[in-house]
Image (cartoon, rainbow, N blue to C red):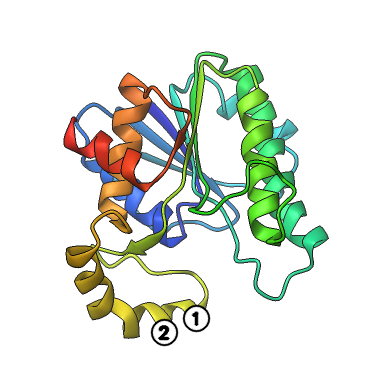
Amino acid sequence: MKVLLFGATGMVGQGVLRECLLDENVQLVQTVGRTALGVAHRKLRDVVHSDLLHYDALEGSLSGFDACFFCLGVTSSGMSEQDYERVTYGITLATAEVLCRLNPQMSFIYVSGAGTDSSERGRTMWARVKGKTENALLRLPFSAAYMFRPGLIQPMHGERPKAAVYQALYTIAKPLLALLRRIFPNQVLTTEEIGHAMLVVARRGYPKHILEIRDIRAVLQNP
C-alpha cells in the first residue's frame, strides 16, 4: 500500500507516520507539508509544499496512492469562524478535490473530532465547520471516505503537539490521560491506536463512514 499523509508534524500525524513506517504492508509513505520533517527512513518521501490550497505544481507527485490520511488541523481557540473555516474546510477540500481526481481508487481518511456537528447548524463553531468539512468529503467520488472522530488523545511514543501551550498542557496531563484511559477506555485513544486503526480501515474498509471512538476501538479489536 502507498500512503499519502498530511499533517505529519502534528501530534496525531506523528503517531500515524510511526505506524505507517512500522507496517510491513506499507510500501511508501509520502508526507506533504509546509516544513520538512527531518526524518529519514527507507519508506519515507517528505515533500515540502508551502501552498496547501493549490497543487498545480505538485500534481505529478500526488498520483498512484492507495490511501490518504489527512491529520492536518488547527485549534479554533482565538480564531474567527471565517479564519477557522478557511483552514479546516478550505485546505482540506482543496487537497481532497485534487486527490480524488488523481486517485479515484483512493481511500481518504480524515481526522475530525468527537462532538462534530453533522447538521452544520449547532451552536459550537468548530463542530459546525468540522461537520461541513466531513459532509463535503463524503460527497466526493473517492472509492471510500471515512471520518475519524477521536476524543481525548494520549501520545504514546514521544509525539508532541506543535503549539507550545499544548505541549505544556500535555506534559502536565500525561499521568491523568493514562489513568483516564484505564478507567474510561471508550473516551481516550492513543496516537498508536489511531494510526493502527486508520491502516486497518484503509485496507479493508468499515461498515460506517463516520467512526466514533467506539467504532475505532471495534476496528482495533478485529484487526
Q: Is residue 112 above or below residue 175?
A: above
Instruction: State the residue at coordinates (25%, 62%).
Output: 184
Number of other residues with Cα within 10 Å of mark 2, as a class: few under 14, some 14 to 19, many 20 or more: few
Q: Give residue 168's mark.
A: 2
Q: Nearer the viewer, residue 197 or 48?
A: 197
Mark 1 nearby-residue class (10 Å; few <14, some 14–19, many ≥20) = few
* Residue displayed at 43% across by 27% down: 208
Place of residue 181 in the rendered image (x, y in percent of width and height, measured from the top left): 23, 64
Q: Could you say where residue 221 lies in the image, as x and y percent from the top left?
A: 17, 37
Helix, strand or loop at mark 2: helix
Say whether residue 179 is visible. Answer: yes
Q: Residue at x 36, y 47 (%)?
A: 213
Q: Which residue is denoted by mark 1 in the rendering?
A: 164
Asked whether 49 or 5 is in front, the reply is 5
Quarter that holds the C terminus: top left
Q: Quadrant of residue 167?
A: bottom left
Disc 2 vs disc 1: Cβ atoms closer than 8 Å?
A: yes
Left or right, 168 with reference to 145 = left
**Residue 147 image label:** none
Viewer-closest of 32 and 101: 101
Measured as percent of width and height from the top left, residue 214 is found at: 32, 44
Q: Position of residue 164 (x, y in %)?
A: 49, 81
Q: Amino acid at mark 2?
A: Ala
- Quadrant location of the N terminus? top left
Side of 165 where 201 appears, left or right: left
Give the SS element for disc 1: helix
* Residue found 45% across the figure and 52% down from its top: 8
Res. 20 visible in picture: no
Tell me the amino acid under the disc marked 1.
Ala
When the figure is inspected, residue 80 is found, relative to residue 3, above or below; the finding is: below
